[in-house]
Amino acid sequence: KKIKKKKKKKWKWIKKKSTPQKLGMSLTISEEDAIRRHFEKCWNIPSGAREAGNLAAEIKVRFNKEGNVLDARILDINRMKRDRYFRTAAESALRAVLNPRCRNAPLPIDKYDKWKNITLNFDPKNVIGY
């Protein structure tokens, strides 16, 4: 009997809790893309980092209703302690989220409950083609 290998799922830019959502009330792909573009413009990817394609950092973000960041934190604290390259990449992602130029994220007010707490995935390979 052959054992099927599970395919690795690619990380999405935005991760949401897997709770039931009302039809039409989740973020659309174009809304997620607008959020990604909004924060990418403030993100300075560390240059020359080894294995830049393996430095994706997840940032847990809490927004107010105006689309401004109330607080943000890096999720993988353990990896930050042991991998200085990851720490550099994760800190640059956190700075992007907290950057004053990236205030007023383009978030639909009618879906505030869906985006007030989200996780953003900053992955250099999605930007630089790794």
Image (spheres, grey):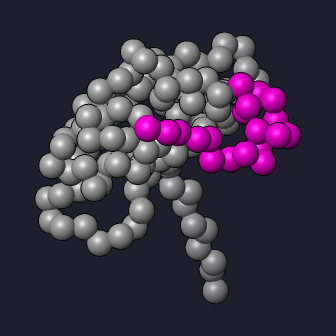
Which of 62 and 15 lies nearest the eye of the viewer?
62
> Could you tell me which residue is drawn at 19 percent across and 41 percent down?
108
Which of 101 and 4 lies nearest the eye of the viewer?
101
- Asked if 130 appears above or below 48 in the picture, the reply is below
Quarter of the image where the N terminus is located: bottom right
Horizontal relation, residue 39 to residue 48: left or right: left
> Could you tell me which residue is drawn at 55 percent across and 16 percent down?
44
Q: Quadrant of residue 105?
A: top left
- Asked if 130 appears above or below 72 in the picture, the reply is above
Magenta-span inclusion, residue 105: no
Horizontal relation, residue 70 to residue 130: left or right: left
Instruction: Give percent across and percent down for residue 35.
Output: 33, 33
Instruction: Give percent across and percent down for residue 25.
Output: 18, 58
> Could you tell me which residue is drawn at 41 percent across and 26 percent down?
39
Residue 48 seen in this snapshot: yes
Name, please, the residue furthest toward the right.
82
> Could you tell me which residue is drawn at 63 percent across and 78 percent down?
3
Instruction: Give percent across and percent down for residue 16.
Output: 40, 56
- Asked if 92 appears above or below 123 in the picture, the reply is above
Instruction: Give percent across and percent down for residue 37.
Output: 35, 26
Quarter of the image where the C terminus is located: top right
Horizontal relation, residue 42 to residue 80: left or right: left
For the record, the magenta segment spans: 70-88
